[in-house]
């Protein structure tokens, strides 16, 4: 098990990270990366706090030692509830704004391990690689990023039919030690300060001819030839009072560029088999489990927004007006829909005889993923609607209260039951959610983090297991 200090030390490895046009000498010292690194380190430190240890740490039959809870293979409904508690505790540290915290990919690696026999369809070596990787990741408490998408210059063309095929990650040479890969993958959140990246393809995305792009593998972030190209930073380091979220939780998104990177065969899980890579995500039931993590994350995030809206409307004296309480009641109902879906997915969880692992009920655990893109945007819109022009009365900084305009601000910006300073503090938080670049990124994140939301809804319809049940009831009624 690792703590925050050893996590931070693990990032001083000579990795090649580019931000603002410059190569970052040491990510742990970079003012725009350091805050999210410290926020992630805090999660690892919690594993050593006596009051949280039982929630976050468990004994493992697989490694023979202690592992993080989200690496645990769930066998019972109680295990799923314990997993939920661990994710909730971690998510509460960033109020759900660091969605790609380690628990997300701990879960993915664990699900792959429990279906390792799927990888045996390619070869026994690939199966062994998946098994060994799980032990490596769980034992060393590895923080993973992932990148599934390809930078397709033309989205309507297959990978092998692109004008410049070289931009898409692919195997370029097979050696006795491993596979050499070149090309890029998009988007990898937290790559600048993760330990390793797992790459694979979006399900059912590849076609015959794409064989060299069909790849599932893990690569350490300091691998020679691997570059991390960061987007613009949305962080405001050192300004916690004025940007309470973006100053601490701007998990950086990046493009990964591979220039003849060597991946040892022990870290290659699938290669060159289009039908296997297309089937991997569904057959390994990865969505069933990662959707549980993302649902809990969404719930925590919505709870913060709801509480903030209640506080702001109280402060404006509008909370009890019919239209405001109606809007807040609707927000509460959305939260309960998400919470209820998570609990129902656990209550109706079933053990898969194939691997003796218990999975949350698929249809109910998908509800937050399906509704999230819509609900999150609505919450942000509600926040704007309920706060109105008060958002435009907040000065640039809370420190302005200590300057020449301080007395006027204290006199004229008060709210119901709160001082002007307290009111502005709330409004700065609201602006970080609904007005800043950071806030805007989160609306985009909720829309797309799990893939194209329209495609996801289509998938829900296609896979909906209770469809026949409803159709049969319909047929009984109309006598078909
Ligand atoms: C903030 C953020 C963080 C992310 N972090 C990660 C991460 O850590 N790891 C990771 O793997 N991914 C990550 N993603 C990427 C995510 O996986 C993708 O956004 C998602 O898969 C959707 O792909 P896309 O963004 O290219 O959009 P698309 O799926 O291309 O959709 C964009 C639009 O194009 C339309 N479109 C696309 N293809 C077609 C077509 N063939 N015909 C007609 N219309 C089409 C869609 O309907 C949609 O309106 C992140 C995304 C965001 C926004």
Image (cartoon, rainbow, N blue to C red):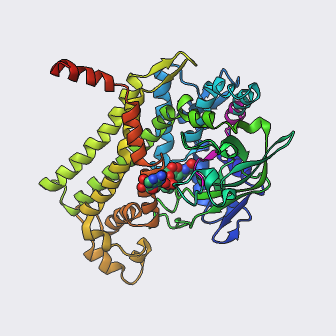
Residue at point 71% right, 52% down? 11
Relative depth, front residue between 210 and 194: 210
Asked if residue 292 lies left or right of residue 129, the reply is: left
Whether residue 144 appears in magenta in the rendering, the answer is yes
Residue, far top: 353
- Residue 158 x %, y %: 58, 50
Asked if residue 252 lies left or right of residue 178, the reply is: left
- Residue 229 x %, y %: 65, 62
Image quadrant holding the N terminus, namely top right
Q: Is residue 471 visible?
A: yes
Image quadrant holding the C terminus, namely top left
Quarter-of-image position of residue 384: bottom left
Asked if residue 149 lies left or right of residue 166, the reply is: left
In the image, residue 59 above or below residue 261: above
Whether residue 182 appears in magenta in the rendering, the answer is no
- Residue 212 x %, y %: 70, 45
Residue, far right: 176
Quarter-of-image position of residue 459: top left
- Residue 440 x %, y %: 42, 62
Q: Which residues are magenta?
A: 134-150
Relative depth, front residue between 174 and 11: 174
């Amino acid at each position: 098990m690792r703590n925050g200090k050893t996590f931070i030390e693990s990032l001083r490895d000579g990795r090649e990270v580019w931000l603002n046009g410059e190569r970052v000498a040491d990510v742990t010292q970079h003012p725009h990366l350091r805050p999210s690194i410290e926020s992630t380190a805090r999660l690892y430190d919690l594993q050593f706090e006596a009051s949280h240890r039982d929630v976050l740490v468990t004994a493992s039959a697989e490694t023979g030692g202690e592992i993080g809870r989200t690496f645990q293979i769930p066998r019972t409904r109680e295990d799923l509830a314990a997993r939920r508690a661990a994710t909730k505790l971690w998510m509460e540290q960033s109020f759900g704004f660091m969605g790609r915290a380690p628990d997300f990919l701990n879960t993915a690696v664990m699900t792959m391990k429990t279906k390792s026999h799927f990888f045996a369809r390619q070869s026994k070596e690939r199966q062994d690689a998946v098994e060994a990787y799980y032990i490596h990741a769980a034992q060393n408490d590895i923080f993973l990023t992932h990148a599934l998408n390809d930078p397709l210059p033309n989205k309507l063309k297959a990978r092998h039919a692109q004008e410049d095929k070289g931009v898409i990650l692919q195997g370029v040479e097979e050696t006795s030690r491993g596979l050499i890969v070149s090309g890029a993958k998009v988007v990898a959140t937290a790559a600048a300060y993760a330990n390793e990246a797992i790459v694979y393809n979006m399900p059912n995305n590849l076609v015959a001819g794409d064989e060299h792009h069909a790849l599932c593998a893990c690569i350490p972030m300091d691998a020679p030839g691997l570059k991390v190209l960061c987007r613009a930073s949305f962080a405001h380091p050192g300004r916690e009072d004025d940007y309470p979220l973006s100053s601490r939780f701007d998990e950086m998104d990046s493009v990964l560029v591979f220039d003849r990177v060597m991946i040892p065969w022990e870290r290659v899980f699938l290669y060159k088999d289009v039908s296997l890579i297309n089937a991997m995500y569904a057959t390994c039931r990865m969505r069933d489990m990662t959707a549980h993590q993302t649902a809990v994350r969404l719930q925590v995030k919505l709870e913060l927004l709801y509480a903030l809206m209640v506080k702001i409307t109280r402060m404006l004296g509008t909370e009890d007006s019919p239209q405001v309480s109606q809007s807040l009641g609707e927000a509460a109902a959305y939260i309960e829909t998400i919470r209820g879906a998570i609990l129902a997915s656990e209550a109706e969880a079933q053990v898969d005889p194939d691997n003796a692992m218990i999975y949350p009920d698929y249809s109910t655990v998908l509800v937050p993923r399906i509704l999230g893109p819509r609900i999150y945007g609505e919450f942000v819109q509600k926040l704007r609607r309920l706060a109105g022009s008060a958002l435009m009365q907040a000065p640039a900084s809370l420190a302005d209260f200590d300057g020449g305009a301080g007395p006027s601000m204290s006199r004229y910006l008060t709210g119901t039951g709160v001082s002007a300073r307290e009111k502005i503090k709330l409004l700065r938080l609201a602006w970080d959610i609904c007005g800043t670049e950071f806030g805007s990124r989160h609306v985009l994140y909720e829309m797309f983090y799990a893939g194209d939301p329209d495609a996801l809804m289509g998938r829900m319809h296609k896979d909906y297991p209770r469809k026949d049940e409803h159709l049969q009831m319909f047929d009984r009624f109309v006598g078909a």
